[in-house]
Image (tube, rainbow, N blue to C red):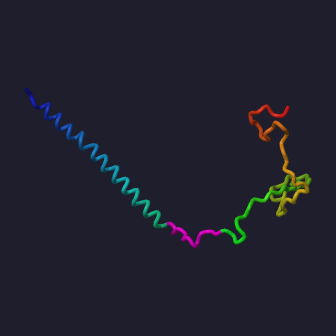
Amino acid sequence: MKTEWMDIAAERSVLAGIAPFIAGVVVVAVLVGAMWLNSRVRAGEPRRPLPEEQPRLPEGGPVHEERANREPDEIPKSELRLTPYEVHGNMGSRPSTSQERPRWSKGGSGSFGSGGLGAH
């Protein structure tokens, strides 16, 4: 009986056992390197704020939502094309005389392509 083939098979089984071990060592080395790089990056960042540096509620308590309808500004009529800064400038909208919320027509959702039947 020839033992050459058994010797070759034994050598290959040793290599087959060493290869996953080497791959595992490489993966662990990459993970350790990533953790080291992360610690260097975090060391360069500003420190976290202390608890006394955190934002606080105003003395009057939390601020609540305020609802108000506003009248839109009218665009001035002009022969020339207006740029965005010429349309409104620094003027804001003004409060509306009616504070009733605008509603869509019955059966409509107010959006295009809502998939419904719409108002008929």
In-image side of 3 versus 86 (left or right): left
Q: Provide residue 116's location: percent of width, then percent of height.
A: 76, 33
- The magenta-colored residue range is 45-56
Q: Is residue 48 magenta?
A: yes
Please say if 65 is above or below 58: above
**Magenta stretch holds residue 120:** no
Q: Quadrant of residue 114?
A: top right
Up the image or down, 60 lies above or below 75; here it is below
Which quadrant is the C terminus positioned in? top right
| Viewer-closest of 54 and 2 | 54
Q: How many marks?
A: 0
Which residue is situated farthest in the top direction here?
1
Relative vertical location of residue 54 with respect to residue 100 in this rendering, above or below: below
Residue 8 pos. (x, y %): 16, 34
Spot occupied by residue 12 in the image (x, y as percentages of width and height): 20, 37
Tell me the quadrant of the picture where the N terminus can be found.
Answer: top left
Point 92% across, 53% down: residue: 77
Give the residue at the far front of this rendering. Answer: 61
Dominant secondary-structure state across the stretch colored magenta: loop
Judging depth in this view, the residue of 76 and 91 nearest the camera is 91
Which residue is pictured at 11% across the width and 32% down the height? 4
Q: 99 or 89, which lies in front?
A: 99
Q: Is residue 108 left or right of residue 34?
A: right
Which of the 4 quarters of the picture holds residue 18?
A: top left
For image coordinates 74% across by 33% down, the residue present is 115
The image position of residue 16, as x and y in percent, is: 24, 39
